[in-house]
Image (cartoon, rainbow, N blue to C red):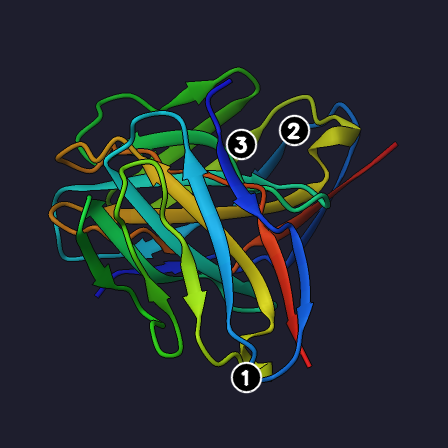
Amino acid sequence: AQKITQTQPGMFVQEKEAVTLDCTYDTSDPSYGLFWYKQPSSGEMIFLIYQGSYDQQNATEGRYSLNFQKARKSANLVISASQLGDSAMYFCAMREYGSEKLVFGKGTKLTVNP
Amino acid sequence: EAQVTQNPRYLITVTGKKLTVTCSQNMNHEYMSWYRQDPGLGLRQIYYSMNVEVTDKGDVPEGYKVSRKEKRNFPLILESPSPNQTSLYFCASSQGLAGVSDTQYFGPGTRLTVL
């Protein structure tokens, strides 16, 4: 069964510093995709970045990068040069091959301090 | 602008009064889904649809109905709402690609309170 674990309920970071949000997953399927979403206080869910299990390189999208360690089953989100607007909830999610289901972790609340 | 829209955005209702939350997407996506978000539980899938007239249950379907008569619309129906259905609801859509890279895009959310 798919499972996503985000162990950090809350994280704090100073503006302009980098921060890593942890995500570990559990699956027996060799083919899967990992997603990160951002949910600001306004409530919408914003897609940030995707990593496939067979991708050779870690995904990057602007200030977002994914530290993908397949053997450890971890897919940590790294945000570089944090901005005040990065304060939000962040959710890690996974989809296994052949499944129509996107399974979410419980989220990490990031606060960026000025 | 490519988007998923939901209406209403906020709704307060009473137990047992039937309601419908609409969802529409303008991206010609095959796949659509409904989620509910509750504190400490993350997002849980209610129903999903692979295409017109094709729907299936997610993890928490009890108390909900859906229909997919048109590709762009996927309404969520609560025929007899109860207080435990008070939640934040999201509609999402994706291209419906085979494989694992199919990215879901979310609507703005509907905050429902059932008294």
Tell which subunit mark 3 falls on. Answer: A
What kind of residue is marked 2?
Answer: Ala
Asked whether the residues under the numbered discs 2 and 3 touch, taking CB atoms below 8 Å apart as contact, a structural biologist would say yes
- Element type at marker 1? loop
Q: Nearer the viewer, residue B16 or A106?
A: B16
> x, y percentage for residue A3?
32, 62
Q: Which mark is residue B16?
A: 1
How far apart are the alpha carbons under marks 1 and 2?
49 Å
Residue B27 higher or lower than B33, as above or below: above
Question: Which image quarter is the N terminus of chain A in?
Answer: bottom left
Q: Residues within 10 Å of mark 1 (few under 14, many from 20)?
A: some
Q: Quadrant for residue B46, please give it.
A: bottom left
Direction right: furthest residue: A114
Q: Which residue is mark 2?
A: A18
Residue drawn where x is 23% and y is 36% of the image: B30
Give x and y (percent) for residue A11.
Answer: 69, 49
Q: What residue does disc 3 label?
A: A78
Is A47 placed left or right of A58 in the picture?
right
